[in-house]
Amino acid sequence: MTSGGEVVMTRQEMIIQGRDLLGEFFGTPGDADPFAWSRLVSTAADEIARATDCFYTTATADLVSGQAEYCAPQITKVKAVSVYDASGARRTIGSATIGGMDEWSGGWRDEAASTPEMWIPTGLNQIVLYPAPSYSAAGGLVLEGYGVPGVGWSAMSAACPLPDRAHMAVVYKAALLRIIQNPTSDNMARRAMLADEFADMKGKLEAETRRQTYPRPLPSSVLPCEGR
């Protein structure tokens, strides 16, 4: 399947392409653990997304009354945050830094809970809401940013959620990871060529990513961080 000249592949198609690159056909010695390829494709997709910022996504979390800290495991860099207030209205809130908040008010961490007005990054995918919400709301927090497919992409028939132009790079990266697992003489002979091809694909993907504006996909659910 193609889209705009790029190859669009499902997980199963990526596995087949990767096995073809290494000559791991059914019944060959490399076929001893066929399920390894599914894990390698997932790892490759996550690594490429993390390295290139090619996957822009959203995630939702439940707002918990009095809880200020939240995270979204599948988002690697939070870029925007929206909250639903107690009436159910959604609005995007501004961001600030911890240093900026400390200069503004030394007691901001202890202020009474209310409707959040700001978000403060405390890690790549961790934030603090100011003030903490005075109410609970299922799916009341929406985080937006660069992320990884993670566990949200698992079906063999599902297309890889990364941009189409990244799909062949995922195949080559998975093949390189497979060579590390199974360093036969034939695989090692292929390694340099595959590494060069992958580096070229990754470089083009990074360059294109810098020029690309991504639409917002549908949100997926994550849970608030516990005990943070």
Image: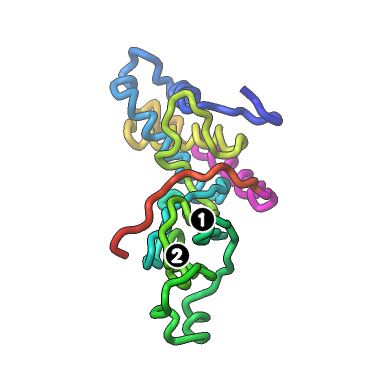
Q: Position of residue 93 (x, y in %)?
A: 57, 65
Q: Would you call the spot at circle 2 few (<14 residues within 10 Å), some (14-19), or many (20 or more)?
A: many
* Residue at 71%, 31% in the rendered image: 4
Displayed quadrant of residue 33: top left
Displayed quadrant of residue 167: top right
* Residue at 33%, 26% in the rendered image: 35
For mark 1, what is the residue?
143
- In what element is the residue under mark 1? strand
In the rendered structure, does residue 211 fall within the stretch colored magenta? yes
For mark 2, what is the residue?
127
Q: Image check: 95 left or right of 109?
A: right
The magenta region covers 192-213
Relative vertical location of residue 88 with respect to residue 39 in this rendering, above or below: below
* Residue at 57%, 57% in the rendered image: 89
Amino acid on which the number 2 mark rests in the picture:
Ile
Foreground residue among 137 and 187: 137
Q: Position of residue 200 (x, y in %)?
A: 59, 41
Displayed quadrant of residue 70: bottom left
Q: Position of residue 117 (x, y in %)?
A: 54, 70
Q: Position of residue 154 (x, y in %)?
A: 42, 32
